[in-house]
Image (cartoon, rainbow, N blue to C red):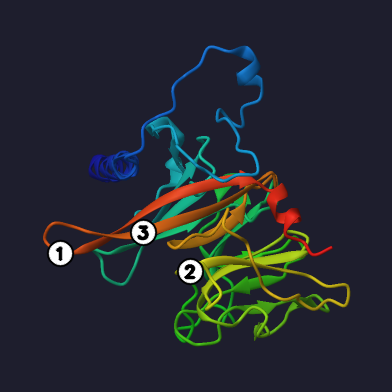
Amino acid sequence: MAVIKTNWTMKKNIIKLLALAFVIFSNACNTKKPETKKNNSSIEENLYFGYKPPGLNPEVFVPKKSTSEDWKLGNEDSLNMEEFYFTYSGNDPFQPAVVVYRQEENYYRASKYTFHPSGTENSNILYSRHNYIERTDFGWSKLKSLGPMFDSKDLGIMVLSISANGTIVFDDYKTDDGIRISRIKDGKQEEPKPLGKEINSGKLVAHPFIAPDESYLIWDSEREEGYGKSDNYISFRQQDGSWGSAINMGDKINSELVENGARLTPDGKYFLFRRSEEKVKEDGSTYWETKDYWVDAKIIEQLRPQ
């Protein structure tokens, strides 16, 4: 019994060490300067989870440094080295709500699954590619598959987004189908179908986000009329249920660089996206530098055709 207890304690310590390493790595990737703390009660009252919110002009989001207190190991009393997770309780809206690590067929390889809020408040189900997890009385469930329509070796889902009514949109890097959609009909999830040319035009059509009420769809792609590389586009749902023409989200959102990863904060107040630039090192090798941006979500309504 003593040996079993020692091994179990060792497992818990290993996982906690991983949590600390995860936090250190996150901070190492963040080279931005922290915000200056101001002693002004009127400013404090207008903060959004401790941050000064942006207006209708996108601003670089400068996160405070994560600490070990921001990440909590889930289900400590019933840990399983084959699959475990951390929950995020900090104030950075770009961080995933839950990070799951699962041991794959190779004993020394663990896959990482990040779960972001779906865009609706108080969500008890989170999605990551072809998987989902459910909130339980004891934390979060183990990874569950969305089923063969989504969990297939023939599919290469990078981003999956779901509306409040259960409509799913996702991309697929393994085919040229672009973004597909699957609605709920008669209580069942329909077979996913590619969206029309309004959405699936241009190159590298990916990273969809469907509004919780399905009133619009945002994604990124490279198009001839774009500002440079990948731009964010939006399509508004029409009265007949069809999708309107793609609208480039403009030079406030897009640039000559790569813009993608669009979504809303769970309360719908702010629009989040990422801007990436390929840079060259002294040895000639390249790397990508990515910055997070946020802007008041009212900018979306400014793009809606009158």
Amino acid at circle 1: Gly
Disc 1 target residue? 284
Q: CA distance from mark 1 to mark 3?
A: 15 Å
Amino acid at circle 3: Glu
Q: What secondary structure is marked by label 1?
A: loop
Q: Give above or below for 274 relative to 215.
A: above
Q: Residue at 53%, 54% (x, y): give it.
A: 273
Disc 2 target residue? 230
Q: Give above or below for 81 relative to 286.
A: above
Q: Earlier in the sequence, mark 1 or mark 3?
A: 3
- Are dots 3 and 2 in contact, CB under 8 Å? no
Q: CA distance from mark 2 to mark 1?
A: 24 Å
Q: Position of residue 292 (x, y in %)?
A: 47, 48
Q: Residue at 60%, 56% (x, y): give it.
A: 263
Q: What secondary structure is marked by label 2?
A: loop
- In which quadrant of the rendered view does residue 147 lie? bottom right
